[in-house]
Amino acid sequence: MSQASPDREAGEEPKPETVADGWVQRFLTHLAVEKGASAYTQRNYRQALVEFTAYYHKAFGGEPKWSGLGRDDFRGYLRSLGRQGLGRASTQLRFSALRGFYRYLIRLGQVESSPIKNLALPKMPRRLPRFLTAEQMNGLLEAPFKVLESREGRGGKQPERRQKVVCFRDVAVLETIYSCGLRISELCNLRVVDLDLNSRLVRVMGKGRKERLVPIGRQAVKAIEAYWAELGNLPEPDAPVFRAGCRGCRPVSPRDLQLRLKRYLAVSGLDPELTPHKLRHSFATHLLDAGADLRSVQELLGHAHLVTTQVYTHVTTERLKRVYDQAHPRA
C-alpha cells in the first residue's frame, strides 16, 4: 500500500528533530482535538515519534515509510534503546506511542496491520500504589494551617492577606483531591459552575474528555466555602474554583500545587517526594478498605477499564494478609 505524506512532497528531506512527517503531525492533532489527550500525553507521544524518526533517519538515511516497516525494524529500535541504557518504563512509553500511532494509521487505511503487535518488550515490575493512612491524611490536611500559624509566631506579625487566602485555598485543594479522588489536572480545571455544593456533587472532565459526576464530602464543601469567604466574594460561575492568587481569574497550576504539597508533606513528617497522585491512591484505597465495591471505585476514579482499578485490591489484600498473620492463632 502506498503511503505519501499528506503534508509534504515526495523526496523532500526529513528533519528528524521536528515533526516534519505529515502523518505524525496529523496523529498529534488527532490526540489533541479528537481524543482530548492531556498536554503531558501529547508531549510524550510527540517526543517518542520524533525520536523514532531520528533513529530511523540515522540508521537508514531516510524517512520511515510506515506501511513498509516490519517487526525487525522495531526490534532494531528496541535494541538501540537498550544500548542507551533506557529503563523499562521509558521503553514502554515509546512503544505505547508507536502502537497508538499505528492504530491511527490502520483506522485511516494507511497500513493493514501493526508491525509492533506481539513484539516482546521488557516487562514492567509490578508496583503497588503508595498511599497515606487515614491518620497521615489528617495530619497533611492540617499542615497548611500549621504553616500559617508559624508565620503568625514570627515576631508577632499577622500574616498577609494573600498568605491567609493561599492557606485556605490549599486546605480546600487537599480536601477536594482526597474527597473526590481527582487527578491534579482535573482539579485545576474545575470551574465554579462544575460544583453543586447543595447536592454535594462535582462534574469532572476526565481523560479523553469523558465527563463524570463525583460526590464531594461535607468537609471538602466547608473548606471550599471557607476559602471563598477569605477571597471576599463569591466567584463567577465560569471562574476557576481554585485561583492562583487573591486577584484575577487564573487557575492555580499543577506545578505550584506539587511544590506546595512537598512543603506540607515535610511539615507533616511525611516523604516530600510523594506526589498529588498519591492522594488519589489514598482515596481509592481507603474506600476499598471501608467496603466499597471495585466497580463503584472505578467509576469514581474515571478509569476506562476495571483492570486499572484492580491494582488497589492488591493493596487491600496485602493489608488483610498482614492483619491475618498478626491476629490468627494458627497463621
Image: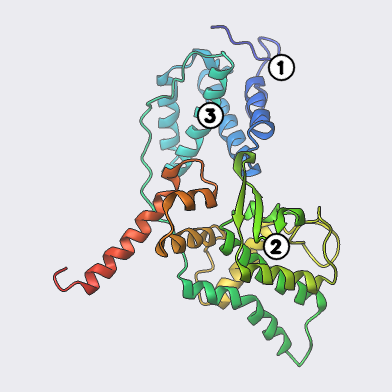
Of the residues shown, which amino acid type is indicated by label 3?
Answer: Gly
Check disc 2 and report its element: helix, strand or loop: loop
User: In this orientation, does residue 166 appear?
Assistant: no
Whole-percent x, y for residue 19 in the image: 66, 28
Find disc 3 in the rendering and name its residue.
100
For the residues marked 1 and 3, what is the alpha-carbon distance in whole angstroms?
A: 20 Å
Label placed on residue 116: none
Question: Circle 2 sits on which residue?
Answer: 197
Gap between marks 1 and 2, in whole Å?
49 Å
Name which residue lies at 28% across and 67% down: 322
Image quadrant holding the C terminus, namely: bottom left
Q: Position of residue 2 (x, y in %)?
A: 57, 7
Q: Is residue 172 above or below residue 113?
A: below
Residue at 60% x, 77% y: name it. Answer: 142
Helix, strand or loop for disc 3: helix
Sort mark 3 into few (<14), some (14-19) or many (20+) by Cα contacts within 10 Å: some
Asked if labels 2 and 3 touch by Cβ distance under 8 angstroms, the answer is: no
